[in-house]
Amino acid sequence: MGKVLQKEAFGLAAKDNSGVLSPFSFTRRETGEKDVRFKVLFCGICHSDLHMVKNEWGMSTYPLVPGHEIVGVVTEVGAKVTKFKTGEKVGVGCLVSSCGSCDSCTEGMENYCPKSIQTYGFPYYDNTITYGGYSDHMVCEEGFVIRIPDNLPLDAAAPLLCAGITVYSPMKYHGLDKPGMHIGVVGLGGLGHVGVKFAKAMGTKVTVISTSEKKRDEAINRLGADAFLVSRDPKQIKDAMGTMDGIIDTVSATHSLLPLLGLLKHKGKLVMVGAPEKPLELPVMPLIFERKMVMGSMIGGIKETQEMIDMAGKHNITADIELISADYVNTAMERLEKADVRYRFVIDVANTLKPNPNL
Ligand SMILES: NC(=O)c1ccc[n+]([C@@H]2O[C@H](COP(=O)([O-])OP(=O)(O)OC[C@H]3O[C@@H](n4cnc5c(N)ncnc54)[C@H](O)[C@@H]3O)[C@@H](O)[C@H]2O)c1
Ligand SMILES: [Zn+2]
Ligand SMILES: [Zn+2]
């Protein structure tokens, strides 16, 4: 193999598990035949970025450039790229590659490919480590690039690439997308608030389940939820027992599943998408007595990510965001830890991250 050509890149990286990000220069590969290169305009801050920055899942390597809710404008395409042209608005979510031939890949579920490569912190084929979207530009195989509908504002669309697909995929897969169904959404953060919007667009009745009354007004009047339940209030839980077809649990910390299982109808499904660092306690009696199910779900495939964002375009679904400058990222991480965000931080990368003069 000849000399591998590379391009200078600049971003923000965690250098250790302290939770602090700082400027970082690195290189990305040249645009390969099937690669799309794009200038990053905006990147959302997912709670997974925070888990990874702090190595809470025990799988982080440093330096770690987070970011998997990335949108931008195409600057260069490889000779064999057919789907994208320079100037087009594109995005990349949590995946940048997969094997392409296993059962999961064949079924369009690259997210479950055992050899899938995540957008940051994973070894790539050329023995480099993948770096995410808190950076000035990206290069990605065209098969993992998503087209952003023209009518969506790019900053508020960015979080759909992880938060959006993570709630959309299980609703579709588990048949929780049928009008008339009653869906619960636990945890009203980045994932939860877009979960409410998609579930409403699918025509279901949506109840937000939260730990305090604080978000009741916003959940109902701003996000369009039909009802709001405080999970720590036994009376509110009791009144809603056995009413829900499915619950999407987006909570990022350990919490009790018992009240949630109680809210489900017979055969109801509790889908775990939140990924706390410690195991949760699973009460089995409600599962046994009423054939209830608990399952997990991880992001979604590329085809369904495109479907999700096209649906968002049709229904004008975007995230409610706080647009921040790159130098605010450490404060944003601290606030995210305390659930002090309405409802997603998005970094204004192109305007505020120090540009790379060589790009
Ligand atoms: N399964 C996947 O594919 C996938 C994809 C993206 C994110 N995630 C995970 O989902 C979780 C949520 O991500 P996010 O970006 O929406 O985070 P977020 O911080 O925006 O939202 C988390 C919500 O959980 C609530 N919460 C925190 N601790 C709680 C507790 N003890 N009890 C009840 N509620 C509590 C917070 O108030 C907040 O509303 C994270 O663990 C993240 O890593 C999973
Ligand atoms: Zn994410
Ligand atoms: Zn595969």
Image (cartoon, rainbow, N blue to C red):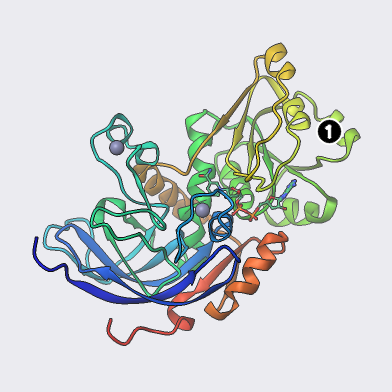
Of 273 and 64, nearer the camera is: 64
Quarter of the image where the C terminus is located: bottom left
Percent x, y for residue 273? 57, 41
Image quadrant in which you'd find residue 275: top right
- Residue at the image point whose x is 43% and y is 42% from the top: 300
Q: Secondary structure at mark 1?
A: helix
Q: Residue furthest right?
A: 235
Q: Residue furthest top?
A: 289
* Neighbours of disc 1 within 10 Å: few (<14), some (14-19), many (20+): some
Q: Is residue 261 left or right of residue 235?
A: left
Q: Is residue 163 left or right of residue 2?
A: right
Q: Where is mark 1, residue-wise?
A: 237
Q: Amino acid at mark 1?
A: Ile
Quarter of the image where the N terminus is located: bottom left
Q: Is residue 243 left or right of residue 138?
A: right
Q: Is residue 65 left or right of residue 279?
A: left
Percent x, y for residue 108? 32, 37
Q: Residue furthest bottom?
A: 357
- Residue at the image point whose x is 55% and y is 39% from the top: 202
